[in-house]
Amino acid sequence: MDLSKSKDDLLRKLRREIDDECVLDAMRRVPRDLFVTAVNYAYSYDDRPLPIGEGQTISQPFIVALMTQALRLEETSKVLELGTGSGYQTAILAELAGQVVSVERLPNLAMSAKVILDNLGYTKVSIHIASDALGWPDYAPYDAILVTAAAPKVPQTLIDQLKIGGRLVIPVGSRWEQNLVQVIKHEDEREVSYLTACRFVPLIGEDAWDEES
Ligand code: SAH
């Protein structure tokens, strides 16, 4: 099946709302079809989330692009991603940043993402299985932190892992609907900007949701 037309259509659509050319280039370079499950192959370049097993989803391409743009990455940036999932967003980050630390709580997803990312030759990525505490403090502080699962509020533990001037992009709200926000850490305050309404799977753990509730 030739997906090049649907990929072109998707990129044309993204271009209407995303103006960072580096982000658009990364979206062009990374083959989303390698990160979706076989049954969804034909829909790889539809602008929507798709199931990836274990009750999780690969994020909608527009949301991936919007979140990545809001991180304002540079070639030297060290970025933390919470929620590796399929590894698709991880690859987009690796196209733009100097070092990508990605944390996933479900070992099967972490493993399959690692295989795909290794095969694609992404060497700046390390994938870790989540511990109880949010994030990955061992490698902190980060220039940017991306959370690809929904939290009830902005977790202070993640702000603590950011550099001054660093950007955190996170969906915040209820388990069913959230606002995607960008938080910039200043010396003694947080600057919060609203990006869009969204719907993500819940972030599980301390400072977030219980698995069952
Ligand atoms: N960016 C991914 C989105 C995956 S869905 C993609 O596009 O494929 C969100 C992921 O966050 C799920 O895989 C889920 O297991 C993971 N997750 C939930 N809580 C987490 C936590 N506390 N730490 C790390 N990962 C978490």
Image: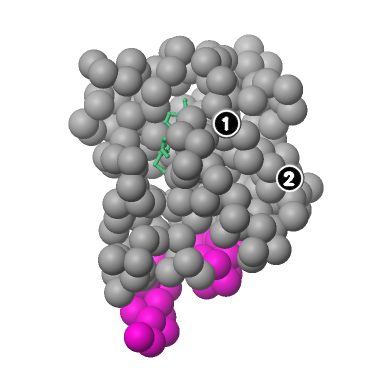
User: x, y percentage for residue 67?
Assistant: 47, 46
Residue at x-position 36% and y-position 61%: 37
Residue 99, which numbered label?
A: 2
Q: Is mark 1 within 8 Å of ligand 1?
A: no
The magenta region covers 1-30
CA neighbours of label 2 inside 10 A, class few (<14), some (14 to 19), many (20+) = many
Mark positioned earlier in the residue sequence (1 or 2): 2
- Tell whether position 82 is magenta: no
Secondary structure found at label 1:
strand
Relative to 153, residue 147 above or below: below
Tell me the amino acid under the disc marked 1.
Ile
Relative to 131, residue 40 above or below: below
Secondary structure found at label 2:
strand
User: x, y percentage for residue 109?
Assistant: 47, 44
Please indicate, yes or no, whether residue 106 appears anywhere in the rendered image: yes
Q: Quadrant of ligand 1?
A: top left
Instruction: Point out the frontmost of discs 1 and 2.
Output: 1
Quadrant (top left, top right, bottom left, bottom right) of the C terminus: top left
User: Toward which corner of the image does residue 46 lie, by quadrant?
Assistant: bottom left
CA neighbours of label 1 inside 10 A, class few (<14), some (14 to 19), many (20+) = some
Residue 129, which numbered label?
A: 1
Taking the view exactly as shown, the residue that stands out farthest to the left is 176
